Image (spheres, rainbow, N blue to C red):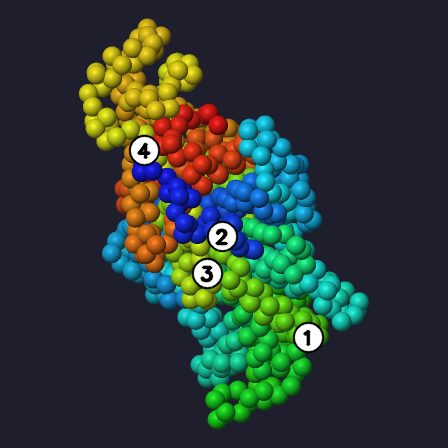
Amino acid sequence: MSKPASRCHLEPNCNLDRAIAEKRVIICVGPGGVGKTTISAVIALHAAMQGRRVLVCTVDPAKRLANSLGVSELGDEASEIALEEFAALGEQPKGSLSAMMLDMKHAFDRLVRDHAPDAKTRAEILDNRFYKYFSTSLAGTQEYSAMERLYELYETTDYELIVLDTPPTVHALDFLDAPNRLFEAIDSSAFDWLAKKSRIRVGLGIIKLGTGYVLKVLAKLTGADFLREFSAFIQSFSGMWEGFKRRAVRTKEILSGDDVAFFVISGADSVALEEARYLNERLIEEKIGVGGFVINRVHQSFVPQPVLCADPAELVGRLQAMGFVGDELGDMLALAQRLQTNAREFHVLANRDQAQLARLSRSVAPGTPIHKVPFFSTDIHSLVGLNRIRSELFGLSEELAPAQRIPGRL
Amino acid sequence: MTIPETTPKLPHEHRFVIVAGKGGVGKSTISMALALAAAKAGRKTLLYQFGTQDSKTKTPFSEATVGEDIVEIRENLFAVRPSTESGMREYVLLKLKSKNAYRLVFENSFIKKLIDGIPGVNELIWLGKAFNHEREREHDGSPTWDTIVLDPPATGHSLYLFQVPFVIREAVQSGPFHREAVEMIELLTDPERTALHLVTLPEEMPVNECIQLKADVDARMGIPIKSLVVNGVFSDLFSESEVHALNTLRPQLEEDGGIIDRLVAAGLFRIERNKLQRSYITKLHNELGLPVIEMPQYFVPELDKEVLADMASRFLELPAAQSRETA
């Protein structure tokens, strides 16, 4: 393993450090299962230690992150995180850190409550069977909710920096796509027609078909009952589209603004990196600034190649010098061989990750920062643990190569 | 499992096999291994993947590219990655039996936009097509596919896709969609035909989400869950006395120490991960009551045929006793 890429604080152009110092919003995107929530918390923690007033919004459904931040639970309202622990470690926090958990399930409900023209419509929508499913379970709705919440926080709070952890997104940048697609559909005549049952033109203006024909075809497919329920659902929304649309437009403006930076968080495996690369391309296409990549859980190689092939008999002597006694252990030679096998296996994983990272850096624009966080032997369960990742990510202790750290010592 | 089974089956021996789990735990790999196991057992198998628009991909099995047409990638093993458009067309034509109506209504740009705007529609079409493959029959009436392995979209919502038929059944009381939904639910909840296999990594978040997923499936859908596959399990290299001896060395290790220090540090790293993994696997055993199939961490540069063959053999050689635990 080479030196951690995290030494970028030495370079004036490091985007992660700059983002932390200058931006108003940092959005962490990436595939699921790569530790996005943890990395978001670490970025927020560092910004707070550096002196900014920070809010981190997580989507972590387990309470583990709350626990590692030293609180029992995070809710939909921001709560301040005590950073005194750091003072004890000899580092005085210069700013403050607040945290909240996005309530994905009810974000859409809140939207309906805010925009419904009257109590009757509101109740109708919230009770609709389609709505209940659409608002909680479909691809895109969670992403949409996260963006809605960001909009609110951006417009109504005065945190210097908001770090947003997003739901795992894979095959599209759903939180950008979903509103766009939804609103294109709303704008289309077909939607209007379903909502108002007015006449539409079908075809390229050559063949004109009445609503009757289209309805008949659709009904044959879905059943009249389904179509009736579905258009009732859409009709109940019809008074609210304008409000939805305004917010979507404004959210898009915020996302493409200069005070927002996106970071793509990923693991080092090929599947996750493929998704990460795709996300990066999509963001660039949308003209949204990408600050760089953070690659989590990169395997380390513990020993240089020659040791892996050294004569195990030679190692036995050194083991004995360390105080190992053959009688207690059985076969010393077997132990030496097993230690070598183990190191060799980690070496394979480290090489694999290196090759993947090299591929990544070849496929992105030159100079795109790629930050690395090593794979640890234990899970991160505390503020001290988060601080350890922070050290790796921000090069606070680069005098130690991570491979030489002793596992189990935090 | 509350319903005792009369004929316990191995994971690949059902007709409709669904692989589910959080993103990044290796679902696609497991679905390939299951499909390979079924093919090796002599079953005509379809590996049914989810792809975004016109995405094509290769499998480690062969040079054949998997796209929207079914391709044979190995003896008894076929694969397909349907695109939304072809799936939609196939479904509509099957139901309407009129190309004209399809062209006029569904190829119309207004309707297209409307359909694209409904979240989840791609996933739904994908699912509908999978059901149709299950219904496919040969001339003699026998099913075309002995096993269909579904590798659902990798989003956090992958399994919630299967809720759609339940929602439709509740929302509409009659008509073709209602009947379709009822049939889908019959298939999904039939323990003879359908098996859901959960996949996880022996790590904290995936384990917790896996436990949550099982609770959701049991409470809301009742799809029979037959096993839990744990990926990436480090094998135990060191004996108990070695673990003890290496641990006693911990305090005297130097961070910038020599070769032996580093070898021992690597050993301790492995021991700690092993211990953590074991505790998660125990937790899964205790909380889920499912047969657990452990897949080892493979130390190879990339996923290849040999790895898949080894994984498949673990499904094939699963002792019958373990699968009977479900009863």
* Disc number for residue A238: 1
Distance, label 2 to label 1, CA atoms, is 40 Å
Q: Earlier in the sequence, mark 4 or mark 3?
A: 3
Q: Are marks 4 and 1 in contact (CB under 8 Å)?
A: no
Q: Earlier in the sequence, mark 2 or mark 3?
A: 2
Q: Are marks 4 and 2 in contact (CB under 8 Å)?
A: no
Are discs 2 and 3 located on one and the same chain? yes
* Disc number for residue A301: 4
Query: Does dot 4 land on a helix, a strand or a loop?
Result: loop
Are discs 1 and 3 located on one and the same chain? yes
Horizontal side of residue B190 vs B273, given as left or right: right
Amino acid at the residue labelled 2: Ala
Q: Earlier in the sequence, mark 4 or mark 1?
A: 1
Distance, label 4 to label 2, CA atoms, is 31 Å
Are discs 4 and 3 located on one and the same chain? yes
When the figure is inspected, residue A91 is found, relative to residue B59, above or below; the finding is above
Distance, label 1 to label 3, CA atoms, is 34 Å
For the residues carrying marks 1 and 3, which lies nearer the camera in this image? 3
* Disc number for residue A19: 2
Q: Earlier in the sequence, mark 1 or mark 3?
A: 1
Amino acid at the residue labelled 4: Ser
Q: Bin the neighbour count of mark 2 within 10 Å (Cα to Cα): few under 14, some 14-19, many 20 and up.
A: many
Are discs 4 and 2 located on one and the same chain? yes
Q: Are marks 2 and 3 in contact (CB under 8 Å)?
A: no
For the residues carrying marks 2 and 1, which lies nearer the camera in this image? 2
Amino acid at the residue labelled 1: Ser
Chain to which mark 4 belongs: A
Q: Residue furthest top?
A: A327
Horizontal side of residue A283 vs A80, given as left or right: left
Residue at the disc numbered 3:
A289
For the residues carrying marks 2 and 3, which lies nearer the camera in this image? 2
